[in-house]
Image (tube, rainbow, N blue to C red):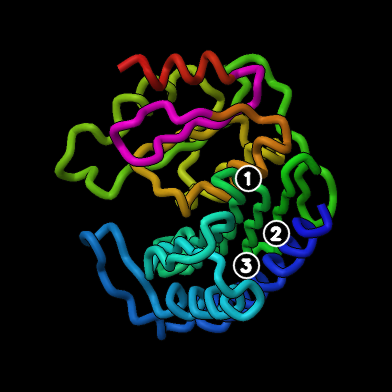
Amino acid sequence: MDTLNKILGDAVAMAREAGEAQMRLYRSGHLDIVEKQNAFDVVTAADKASERIVVDAINRLYPGHSILSEESGLHEGDSEWQWVIDPLDGTTNYSNGLPLFNVSIGVKHNGETVVGVVYAPALGEMFTAVKGGGALLGGNPIKCGSKTLLEQAVVSTGFPYDKAVNPDNNIAAASRVIPVVRGLRRLGSAALDICYVAAGFLDGYWEMSLNEWDVCAALLIASEAGAQWTDFRHDRNRSILVAAPGIYDELLGLVEAG
């Protein structure tokens, strides 16, 4: 556990430094926005600056550990340890001046996520977890919600980048869920969606065609907070549903009904 707590402390420091870099450019008009896959998928100068900060710190403090990062891909290293990084999750929000974005850092040991850090610098929210140690927000323990009725639940979702050209785009599932929940939200940051389920701010979340760096850290935080989650499909990258136990089965049934 001492090793994991050391890694957690270092990951928190990395996330804070990357978050500071993001805030220096936030709403500055100097983002150098570039499209990636299409007009819906963009990268900014802040994504790249954040990645450099985190990757350089890992290489300095944990030389030999492997790294999987959204912008630069896989850096091979020690097969026992892997850092999974989304240097700026919620880039579309960030590039539009919306505050729902974060740095996400997950650490795996022999394939199991053992440390998770999600830091939203514009909101001042730091979510953390160590395997078996519970989940924290700002150093305080968090637990997922206790609702059992979908009609009282507020849930969130998202839509894949190929939504304009692929009819398998989550719109049908959203249409099934909207009439039976108190509210449906679209926050635009998978890691924050999942962490908000962990903290009970949301009661459930689902999205398909995500990537490992989008969810690695947040899913540990959600699990440690008592939420349930699953990969509800295996043909669209990581397709994740996470919810409070009391609404998990019913929400999953609606999402899978198509």
Identified at 49% across, 66% down, the residue is: 77
Determine whether, in the image, residue 116 is placed left or right of residue 84: right
| Callout 2 crowding tier (Cα within 10 Å): few <14, some 14–19, many ≥20 | some
Residue 101 visible in the snapshot: no
- Asked whether residue 147 is drawn in magenta, I would say no
The residue under label 1 is 195
Image quarter of residue 93: bottom left
Determine whether, in the image, residue 165 is placed left or right of residue 149: left
Above or below, 188 against 91 in this view is: above
Label 3 and label 1: CA atoms lie apart by: 16 Å
Residue 184 placed where, x, y %?
Answer: 49, 33
Above or below, 237 against 191 in this view is: above
Element type where label 3 sits in the image:
loop
| Callout 1 crowding tier (Cα within 10 Å): few <14, some 14–19, many ≥20 | many
Give the tally of numbered discs: 3
Question: Which circle's residue, 3 or 1, is located before the other in the chain?
Answer: 3
Query: For residue 125, which numbered disc appears in the image?
Result: 2
Q: Amino acid at mark 1?
A: Cys
Identified at 45% across, 64% down, the residue is: 69
Query: For residue 122, which numbered disc appears in the image?
Result: 3
Q: Are marks 1 and 2 in contact (CB under 8 Å)?
A: yes
Identified at 72% across, 38% down, the residue is: 224
Image quarter of residue 106: bottom right
Label 1 and label 2: CA atoms lie apart by: 10 Å
Magenta-tinted stretch: 230-247
Q: Amino acid at mark 3?
A: Ala
Residue 191 placed where, x, y %?
Answer: 54, 50
Between 1 and 175, the residue placed more toward the observer is: 1
Residue 185 placed where, x, y %?
Answer: 49, 39
Q: Amino acid at mark 2?
A: Glu
Q: Residue furthest left?
A: 165
